[in-house]
């Protein structure tokens, strides 16, 4: 018998739905826009002349308030503060918001400054006392978080009226979070802006007068301070390591995501961190 030659399997014919694969890479599909980006969830559209212009066309001003030690006051002083606060609330003809912000203090720069003073100290007794104090502060910072509280009063102004705006405020907030849309620019004419600016100034003066009767001093935040506050609120961890810096040098109206892939070498300019 003659040995049979084995037959090699033949490749299956390509169907029309499966075109042959070539060595050329196909063009990547355009990535869809992300409706849940940070810019679409922000409620602030612009900051100008110490005011925040919101996406709905309303305005906000913020007052930074100093605290008073209510526990160390006498009973008569406490009653005076309570009556002044009651009169302050009854005198308001517009809504306000009270914001209490707690944040962790970075004690590192303070310890470095103390260490520098200690190295320049020639008195032996003062040097020993400073060493004990630096060690005490360092031990406290490791055992517990040293917190700082800031108090703010937010003064709003709605061009369409306060009552209707308050009724729809909650709806607009939840709709922007759960159903974000593409952020659009707010167009406000000069007449509306000038009216809002004058009304905000009047309301800020009324709030400052009412707070001063209670012994609370307040100051309106300017544009740079508002920018720093929002940056610290939205970036609590990054703000400690990378401060916002000079606000006047920031001329960009918006931030746009770059195209393409970033270089993989972190030593190159623009590399990944």
Image: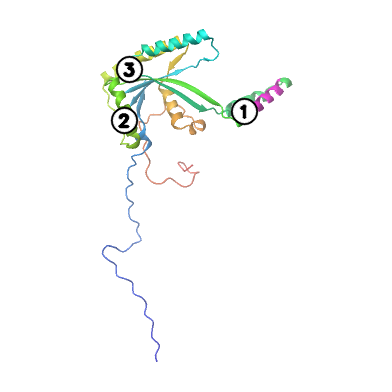
The residue identified by callout 1 is 140
Magenta stretch mostly in which secondary structure? helix
User: Looking at the rendering, which quadrant does residue 74 occupy?
Assistant: top right
Which residue occupies the extreme bottom position in the image? Answer: 1
Tell me the quarter of the image containing the N terminus. bottom left
Query: Alpha carbon of mark 1 to alpha carbon of mark 2: how far?
Result: 44 Å
Left or right of 150 on screen, residue 185: left
Residue 126 visible in the shown view: yes
Examine the structure image and report whether residue 50 is included in the region drawn in magenta: no
Among the two numbered marks 3 and 1 on one chain, the one whose residue lies closer to the N terminus: 1
Q: Secondary structure at mark 1?
A: helix
Q: In the image, residue 161 lies at what x, y percent?
A: 28, 20
Q: Residue at x 52, y 9 (%)?
A: 75
Q: Which mark is residue 210?
A: none
Among the two numbered marks 1 and 2 on one chain, the one whose residue lies closer to the N terminus: 1
Q: Secondary structure at mark 3?
A: helix
**Which residues make up the magenta segment?**
126-137
Examine the structure image and report whether residue 128 is included in the region drawn in magenta: yes
Q: Depth-wise, is mark 3 or mark 1 nearer the camera? A: 1
Are dots 1 and 2 in contact, CB under 8 Å? no
Q: Is 159 drawn above or below residue 85 in the view shown?
A: below
Q: Nearer the viewer, residue 35 or 68?
A: 68
Q: Nearer the viewer, residue 172 or 42?
A: 172
Q: Is 118 drawn above or below residue 8 in the view shown?
A: above
User: Looking at the rendering, which quadrant does residue 187 occupy?
Assistant: top left
Count up the numbered dots: 3
Are dots 3 and 1 in contact, CB under 8 Å? no
Q: In the image, residue 168 lies at what x, y percent?
A: 30, 27
The residue identified by callout 2 is 171
Q: Secondary structure at mark 2?
A: helix
The residue identified by callout 3 is 197
Residue 57 visible in the shown view: no
């Amino acid at each position: 018998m003659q040995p049979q030659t084995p037959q090699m399997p033949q490749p299956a014919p390509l169907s029309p739905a499966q075109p042959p694969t070539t060595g050329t890479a196909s063009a990547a599909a355009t990535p869809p826009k992300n409706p849940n980006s940070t810019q679409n969830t922000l409620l602030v559209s612009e900051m100008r002349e110490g005011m925040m212009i919101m996406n709905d066309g309303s305005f906000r001003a913020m007052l930074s308030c100093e605290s008073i030690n209510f526990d160390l006051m006498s009973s008569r002083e406490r009653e005076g503060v309570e009556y002044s606060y009651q009169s302050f609330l009854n005198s308001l003809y517009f809504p306000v918001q009270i914001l209490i912000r707690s944040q962790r203090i970075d004690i590192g720069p303070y310890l470095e400054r103390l260490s520098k003073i200690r190295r320049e100290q020639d008195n032996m007794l003062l040097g020993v006392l400073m060493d004990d104090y630096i060690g005490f502060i360092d031990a406290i910072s490791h055992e517990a978080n040293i917190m700082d509280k800031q108090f703010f009063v937010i003064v709003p102004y709605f061009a369409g009226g306060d009552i209707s705006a308050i009724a729809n405020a909650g709806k607009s907030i939840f709709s922007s979070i759960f159903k974000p849309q593409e952020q659009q620019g707010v167009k406000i004419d000069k007449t509306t802006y000038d009216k809002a600016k004058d009304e905000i100034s009047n309301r800020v003066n009324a709030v400052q007068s009412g707070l001063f009767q209670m012994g609370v001093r307040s100051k309106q935040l300017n544009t740079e301070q508002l920018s720093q506050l929002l940056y610290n609120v939205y970036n609590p961890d990054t703000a400690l390591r990378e401060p916002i810096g000079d606000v006047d040098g920031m001329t960009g109206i918006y931030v746009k995501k770059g195209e393409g892939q970033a270089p993989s070498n972190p030593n190159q300019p623009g590399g990944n961190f």
